[in-house]
């Protein structure tokens, strides 16, 4: 099983795991309804921001919003939505302030509980983000934020605690930023010591997007899994899985293999405890189907690659051929 999560994961026939879709956003899932099924192919709803929701001080509205978000996920066939936003409005320049409830950690704590409880009650996992300390959106990748322990626990950590420790959220997305000098997803103190050991969190811990990580800190896949991270968001090329397999094989690393198994177990655990299992039984089978357009797309890519290569060869021949002719004329 790949540890990449590209708005969902592919099916695994051998263990009966179906393909999984995931939404992304506190204010809307980012999907379109299946027109053949529902007779309407419009996009999903866009809700008022969480700032507006928090400003009502109305827990019933917060619970109703969680109900509606879960219903949207059910109609769209999604196991999870990466919401709510649980960081704080620490400054006007804060990361994703429009997605977060409040500047107050207790207010955030109280707002997220009814919303997350409502979603989990319908078998849709809430994935609060960005855990934690995402205080700046401009140049947010790798920015180092510093707290003393009291400020950390009373502020940023308090802001996400309600969703995971009280409301029972089974997924969480980390931030791009560093806590001190350590990337959130590589922080054992955050992922294992606080979330799992102190709060008793059982579920999926996922990075923020690692697309084109290259040699950056977001490519520290081994360190992230060792810290307690389970999945790597938007790793389209599958670099994370290859890096982990390579490290295990080259170093005969049984400990890392065990941690990788834990990551897979965490993900499969939230899958079997979700709406994705609705209608499944011991007799159900998962079948891998290749859509008609996929081989066509691959064929076109191959054909255009060959054409590009031929054009390049012809261009080079014309260019160097003319140069030879000029040389000959000069010699005469």
Image: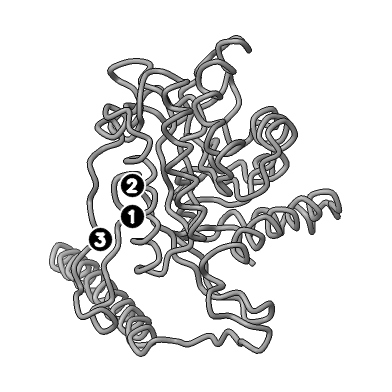
Q: Nearer the viewer, residue 293 or 31?
A: 31
To which quarter of the image does residue 84 belong? top left
Q: Residues within 10 Å of mark 1 (few under 14, many from 20)?
A: some
Q: Nearer the viewer, residue 314 or 292?
A: 292
Q: Nearer the viewer, residue 60 or 224?
A: 60
Image: 292 above or below 191: below
Which corner quadrant holds the C terminus? bottom left
Residue pictured at 58% horizontal, 49% vertical: 170
Q: Earlier in the sequence, mark 1 or mark 3?
A: 3
| Circle 1: element type | helix
Q: Nearer the viewer, residue 226 or 125?
A: 125
Q: Residues within 10 Å of mark 3 (few under 14, many from 20)?
A: some
Which residue matches tag 2?
A: 65
Mark in the foreground, 2 or 3: 2
Q: Earlier in the sequence, mark 2 or mark 3?
A: 3
| Circle 3: element type | loop
What's the distance in space between the residues labelled 1 and 3, CA to CA? 11 Å
What's the distance in space between the residues labelled 1 and 2, CA to CA? 5 Å
Mark 1 near mark 2, Cβ–Cβ under 8 Å?
A: yes
Q: Is residue 243 left or right of residue 236?
A: right
Residue pictured at 40% horizontal, 57% vertical: 70
Image: 129 above or below 133: below
Which residue matches tag 3?
A: 44
Q: Which mark is residue 68?
A: 1
Percent of width and height locating residue 257: 79, 55
Residue pictured at 39% horizontal, 44% vertical: 63
What's the distance in space between the residues labelled 2 and 3, CA to CA? 14 Å
Percent of width and height locating residue 77: 41, 69
Which corner quadrant holds the N terminus? bottom right
| Circle 2: element type | helix
């Amino acid at each position: 099983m790949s540890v990449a999560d590209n708005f969902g994961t592919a099916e695994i026939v051998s263990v009966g795991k179906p393909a999984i879709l995931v939404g992304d956003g506190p204010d809307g899932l980012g999907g379109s309804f299946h027109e053949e099924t529902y007779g309407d192919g419009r996009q999903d709803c866009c809700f008022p921001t969480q700032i507006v929701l928090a400003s009502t001080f109305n827990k019933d509205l917060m619970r109703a919003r969680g109900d509606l978000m879960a219903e949207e996920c059910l109609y769209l066939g999604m196991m999870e939505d990466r919401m709510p936003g649980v960081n704080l409005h620490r400054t006007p320049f804060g990361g994703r302030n429009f997605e977060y409830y409040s500047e107050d950690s207790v207010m955030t704590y109280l707002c997220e509980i009814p919303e997350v409880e409502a979603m989990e009650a319908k078998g849709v996992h809430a994935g609060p983000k960005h855990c934690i300390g995402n205080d700046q959106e401009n140049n947010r990748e790798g920015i180092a934020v510093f707290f003393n322990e009291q400020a950390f626990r009373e502020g940023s950590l308090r802001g996400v605690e309600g969703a995971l420790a009280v409301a029972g959220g089974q997924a969480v997305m980390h931030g791009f930023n560093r806590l001190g000098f350590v990337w959130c997803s590589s922080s054992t103190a955050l992922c294992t010591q606080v979330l799992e050991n102190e709060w008793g969190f059982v579920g999926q811990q996922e990075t923020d997007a690692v697309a084109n990580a290259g040699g950056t800190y977001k490519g520290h896949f081994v360190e992230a899994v060792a810290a307690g991270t389970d999945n790597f968001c938007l790793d389209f090329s599958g670099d994370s899985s290859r890096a982990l397999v390579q490290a295990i094989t080259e170093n005969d690393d049984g400990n890392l293999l065990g941690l990788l198994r834990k990551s897979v177990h965490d993900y499969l655990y939230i899958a079997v405890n979700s709406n994705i299992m609705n209608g499944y039984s011991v007799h159900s089978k998962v079948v891998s189907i290749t859509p008609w357009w996929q081989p066509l797309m691959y064929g076109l890519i191959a054909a255009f690659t060959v054409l590009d290569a031929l054009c390049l060869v012809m261009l080079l021949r014309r260019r160097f051929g003319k140069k030879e002719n000029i040389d000959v004329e000069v010699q005469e």
